[in-house]
Image (spheres, grey):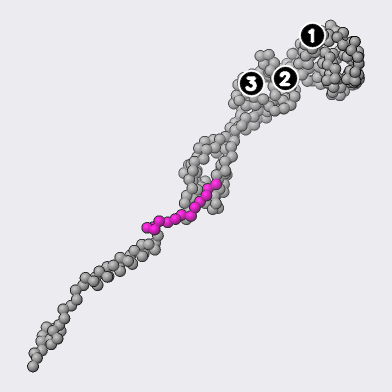
């Protein structure tokens, strides 16, 4: 693979008609030194080091030629999507800022862009749910005309996916897709794409179960969920999202009852505060025993009060009704 940039641009990058008469300051001097360093490193195929030198040079003294060399470094390391975007930027910068590239490099830039268009892989993605976030190799997608491109943005926070169906242009090779949404299980897919390939990829997320943690102030209390025994507390249940009737009970305590609503992927802690049961007076055994004793006492007393006293016998008579005459 041929790289058109070494030597030709060493003097060009830091001079232009608009700035030729400007006094040379420290930034320009350092920018030129970095540019020349990048050129040497490129000749040695030390592309990562050359890229770093050109990028630092551009920050000190922006120029279309420096952008062009940055694009060549991306192209040499197989970062085709970034190379295409950077060649395009070099042409735009040259036109907008008067830092005109030689015609040979304009032609070379356009040729590289066309070459990269043929090398980029394209994948038609179907995604569910549509509001999930998507990252490719840890970086968000970037809009690219009617479609999207991966490998241009730096690694960062994944962005919301473009929709249910969309096409992504990306560098050939092995790519890692990461899809995430709250309440769903993350999906990480590794796919390998051939240069210029057109493929399809379906990314489907599964809902996460909810976790329901049930405990009580009395260990060993029994729990039911939707009237089904689930065992003694404390315990943790995995359930789909929804609303559940929870009851926790223990002998001698007032049962705890509530409704718990959980969302997918959510954890809910439910602690039952059981209170000692207060038995009504009429349900206590001693109340009925005492009541029986009182009733019996009343009956005996009534009998004793209402029974008539026996008639007194005549003082001079016997107990069998006969009399003893008094003489």
Residue linked to disc 1: 95
What is the distance, in whole Å, between disc 2 and disc 1 at their CAs?
27 Å
Task: Please identify, in this view, whether the residue under mark 2 or under mark 3 is nearer the observer.
Answer: 3
Question: Is residue 111 among the parts visible in the rendering?
Answer: no
Q: Name which quarter of the figure residue 177 lies in.
A: top right
Q: Residue at x 30, y 69 (%)?
A: 297
Residue linked to disc 2: 170
Say if mark 1 contacts mark 3, CB within 8 Å.
Answer: no
Residue 275 in the image: state x and y as whole percent. Answer: 49, 52
Residue 78 in the image: state x and y as whole percent. Answer: 79, 20
At label 1, counting other C-alpha atoms closer than 10 Å, the crowd grade (few under 14, some 14-19, many 20 or more) is few
- The correct choice, above or below, for 36 with respect to 309 in the image is above
Residue linked to disc 3: 162
Task: Please identify, in this view, whether the residue under mark 1 or under mark 3 is nearer the observer.
Answer: 1
Q: Residue at x 34, y 63 (%)?
A: 291
Q: Quadrant of the C terminus?
A: bottom left
What is the distance, in whole Å, between disc 1 and disc 3 at their CAs?
32 Å
Q: Residue at x 28, y 67 (%)?
A: 298
The magenta segment is 271-283
Residue nearest the viewer, comparing 25 with 118: 25
What is the distance, in whole Å, between disc 2 and disc 3 at their CAs?
16 Å
């Amino acid at each position: 693979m041929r790289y058109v940039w070494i030597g030709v641009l060493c003097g060009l990058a830091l001079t232009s008609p608009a700035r030729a008469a400007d006094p040379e300051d420290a930034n320009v001097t350092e920018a030129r030194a970095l540019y020349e360093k990048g050129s040497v490193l490129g000749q040695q195929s030390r592309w990562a080091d050359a890229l770093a030198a050109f990028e630092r040079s551009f920050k000190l003294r922006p120029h279309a030629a420096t952008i062009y060399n940055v694009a060549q470094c991306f192209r040499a390391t197989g970062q085709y999507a970034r190379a295409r975007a950077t060649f395009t930027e070099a042409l735009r910068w040259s036109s907008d800022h008067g830092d005109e590239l030689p015609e040979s490099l304009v032609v070379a830039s356009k040729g590289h862009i066309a070459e990269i268009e043929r090398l980029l892989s394209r994948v038609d993605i179907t995604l569910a749910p549509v509001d999930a976030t998507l990252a490719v190799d840890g970086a968000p997608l970037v809009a690219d005309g009617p479609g999207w491109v991966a490998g241009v943005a730096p690694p960062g926070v994944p962005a919301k996916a473009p929709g249910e169906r969309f096409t992504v242009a990306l560098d050939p090779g092995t790519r890692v897709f990461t899809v995430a949404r709250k309440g769903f299980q993350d999906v990480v897919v590794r796919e390998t794409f051939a240069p210029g390939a057109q493929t399809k990829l379906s990314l489907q997320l599964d809902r996460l179960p909810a976790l329901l943690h049930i405990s009580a102030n009395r260990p060993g209390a029994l729990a039911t969920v939707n009237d089904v025994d689930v065992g003694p507390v404390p315990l943790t249940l995995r359930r789909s999202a929804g609303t559940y009737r929870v009851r926790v009970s223990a002998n001698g305590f007032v049962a705890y009852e509530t409704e718990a609503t959980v969302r997918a992927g959510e954890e809910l802690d439910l602690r039952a505060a059981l209170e000692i049961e207060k038995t009504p007076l009429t349900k206590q055994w001693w109340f009925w025993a005492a009541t029986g004793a009182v009733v019996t006492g009343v009956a005996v007393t009534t009998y004793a009060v209402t029974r008539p006293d026996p008639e007194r016998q005549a003082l001079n008579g016997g107990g069998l009704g006969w009399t003893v005459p008094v003489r």
